[in-house]
Image (spheres, rainbow, N blue to C red):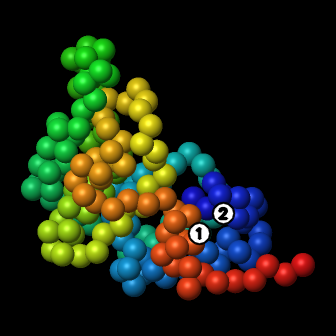
């Protein structure tokens, strides 16, 4: 959420609310898409804040339902093809199966990538917004930026979206 970038630590000022309203409006018009899996992940965050509740309420009716049997096949294929060998080899079969099932059930990453692939097939312009870095860690699955690069899906971080993609629409002044 926006607190990560320190726009407004207490959601008491106008800047954070205006930025959230801006994104809620982009979601309502369909310019920015929040898929059902991302919305579920957001709802499951343990962080409780005015900002989170405000955002959830603003976008709840506009989340995109995407989960179908053929879509789940795409997700399973992505998970299968993007396992990190050095991590997978260090896990028992049972531990690996549990982790892979968690990826399928609890995280939105592969659903986002699969949805972006579908949009690209329809010739839509796609930018996947992620806060993940490309650095390696102990996850058994490649991170979003690595997979996006392989699949030729454009990905950016939230500040890029705000200050490059929407820079003309997000102009504001800071007054003393």
- Asked if the residues shown at circle 1 and circle 2 are in contact, with their CB atoms under 8 angstroms apart, the answer is yes
Q: Is residue 118 left or right of residue 96?
A: left
Q: Quadrant of residue 61?
A: bottom left
Q: Position of residue 21 (x, y in %)?
A: 58, 79
| Observer-nearest of 75 and 63 | 75
Q: Position of residue 43 (x, y in %)?
A: 47, 55
Give the position of the C terminus as an image quadrant.
bottom right
Q: Is residue 81 left or right of residue 23?
A: left
- Residue at 23% x, 38% y is 82
Q: Position of residue 153 (x, y in %)?
A: 28, 60
| Observer-nearest of 99 and 142 | 142
Q: Position of residue 166 (x, y in %)?
A: 51, 79
Q: Quadrant of residue 97?
A: top left
Q: Would you place residue 93 above or below residue 5 in this image?
A: above
Q: Would you place residue 166 above or below residue 99 in this image?
A: below
Residue 58 shows in this picture: no
Q: Residue beneath label 2, please?
A: 50
Q: Secondary structure at mark 2?
A: helix
Disc assigned to residue 54: 1
- Residue at 65% x, 58% y is 5
Q: Is residue 77 left or right of residue 126?
A: left
- Residue at 70% x, 58% y is 6
| Observer-nearest of 143 and 9 | 143
Disc assigned to residue 132: none
Q: Secondary structure at mark 1?
A: helix
């Amino acid at each position: 959420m926006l607190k990560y970038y320190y726009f407004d630590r207490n959601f008491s000022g106008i800047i954070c609310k205006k930025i959230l309203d801006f994104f809620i409006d982009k979601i309502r018009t369909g310019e920015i898409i929040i898929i059902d899996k991302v919305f579920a992940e957001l709802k499951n965050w343990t962080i409780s804040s005015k900002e989170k509740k405000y955002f959830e309420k603003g976008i709840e009716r506009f989340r995109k339902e995407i989960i179908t049997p053929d879509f789940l096949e795409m997700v399973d294929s992505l998970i299968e093809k993007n396992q990190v060998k050095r991590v997978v080899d260090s896990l028992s079969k049972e531990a690996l199966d549990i982790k892979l099932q968690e990826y399928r059930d609890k995280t939105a990453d592969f659903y986002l990538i699969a949805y972006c692939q579908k949009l690209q097939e329809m010739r839509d312009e796609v930018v996947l917004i992620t806060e993940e870095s490309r650095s390696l860690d102990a996850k058994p699955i490649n991170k979003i930026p690595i997979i996006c690069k392989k699949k030729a899906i454009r990905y950016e971080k939230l500040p890029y979206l705000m200050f490059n993609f929407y820079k003309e629409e997000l102009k504001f002044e800071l007054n003393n």
